[in-house]
Amino acid sequence: MTRPITAGVDDSQESLAALDWAGREAVRRGLPLRVVHAWRYAQSLTTADRDTQHGWVSEGVAEAVRAVSGRHRALEVSVDVVEGEAVHELARAAAEAEMLVLGSRGHGPVLGFLLGSVGQQVIAEASRPVVLVRAGDQPAAEAAGRDVVVGQHGDPEDSAETLRFAFETAAARGAAVRAVRAWTLPPVFAYSPGSLRLLDDAGGLEPYERQALADALRPWRERFPEVPVAEQVEMGSAGQVLLSAAGRAQLMVVGRRAHRTAVGARIGSVAHGMLHHAECPVAVVPHE
C-alpha cells in the first residue's frame, strides 16, 4: 500500500507553511499528497446550517490546495474535510500516512509550543512520524547545503526507526545526515563490573560513545551508501547538544518512545525541547 504524505491544515499561516513543506516532500518521494481538515459544527455561533458551514470550510481548504497544486502540477492531491475532533481525526490520518505534517507556532512570548495544543497531542497519539513546520519556513533552507540532523541514543535498535526516517529523507533530498549522540557522566552507583569492563575495552567513556554511534549507523550507511554522514559525539544533555546542531539543520529528527504512562501519552523531554526552540522543521518519530 502506498502511503501518502498527509498535511493537516486549518486557517493559520503555520498550516499553510506545513502544506507547502508536505507538497515538496511528496514530490521528492514520488508520493501522493493528502490534505486533511477537521472541523466542528458551530451551532451557537452562527445561523448558518451544517451544510453551509461545511461549504465555507471546504472552500477555504480548496483555496490553499489550489496554491500548492499550482506549484506542483504533476502532484496527485486528495482532500478530506472531516467533521470531528481535531486530535482524533489527525491521529487517525497519521496512521494511514507515510508522515503527518502540521504547522507549529514554535517559541513565543508566553509558553512557545503551548502545552495541550492540538499539535502536541497529535504527536503523543500518532503511530507514524509527525513533522512540525513553522510559519517562516523557507524552501531555500532545503537547498542551502544544510544537513538532516538526527539524534541517536541507546543501542542500535533503540534508534533504528529514527535513523531510518533521517536517511530516507536525506536520500530523497540529496542531503547529508549529521548523526548526533550526547553523553553524560553516569552517577557512581550506575557503575558495575560489567559496565566498567566494557568501558575499559573501549578505552574510556567518549570512545565507547563514539563506537556506539558508529555501530548504530553501520546498517544505514550500508543501505544508503549515497548519503554522506557526519558523526557528532558531544558531552552534555541530549536537548542542549541537539539544539546546538539545529542551527545548521534543514530538518531535525528525534525519536519518541511510543508507550502510554499512567497520565497518558507523552512526547518526551528531548522532542518537547526541539519543538519549543529549534527554528527548523522538526520530525518526531515514534518507536518501541
Image: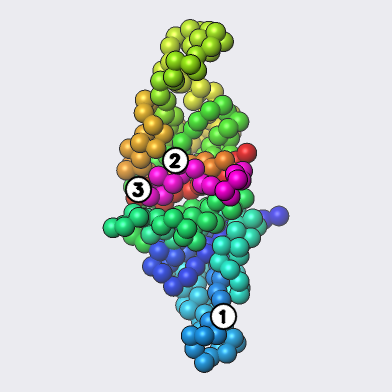
Question: In the rendered view, does 148 fall on the left or right side of 156?
Answer: left
The picture quadrant where one finds residue 244 is top left
Q: What element does badge 1 sit on? A: loop
Looking at the image, which is closer to me, 143 or 215? 215
Q: Quadrant of the N terminus?
A: bottom right
Q: CA distance from mark 3 to mark 2?
A: 11 Å
Which residue extends farthest bottom?
47
* Residue 170 seen in the current view: no
| Residue 129: image location, x then y, percent | 56, 49
Which residue extends farthest left?
109
Q: Is residue 196 above or below residue 160?
A: above
Q: CA distance from mark 2 to mark 1?
A: 36 Å
The structure residue drawn at horizontal position 60% and vertical position 87%, both measured from the top left corner, is 51
Disc 3 residue type (three-letter)? His
Q: Which residue is mark 2?
A: 270
Q: Is residue 274 magenta?
A: yes
Disc 1 residue type (three-letter)? Tyr
- Rate crowding at label 1 as few (under 14), some (14 to 19) or many (20 or more) other CA atoms within 10 Å: some
Q: Which residue is mark 3?
A: 277
| Residue 174: image location, x then y, percent | 46, 44
The structure residue drawn at horizontal position 41% and vertical position 69%, both measured from the top left corner, is 12
Q: Is residue 223 magenta?
A: no
Q: Which residue is mark 1?
A: 41
The structure residue drawn at horizontal position 49% and vertical position 43%, both measured from the top left corner, is 268
Magenta residues (range):
259-276
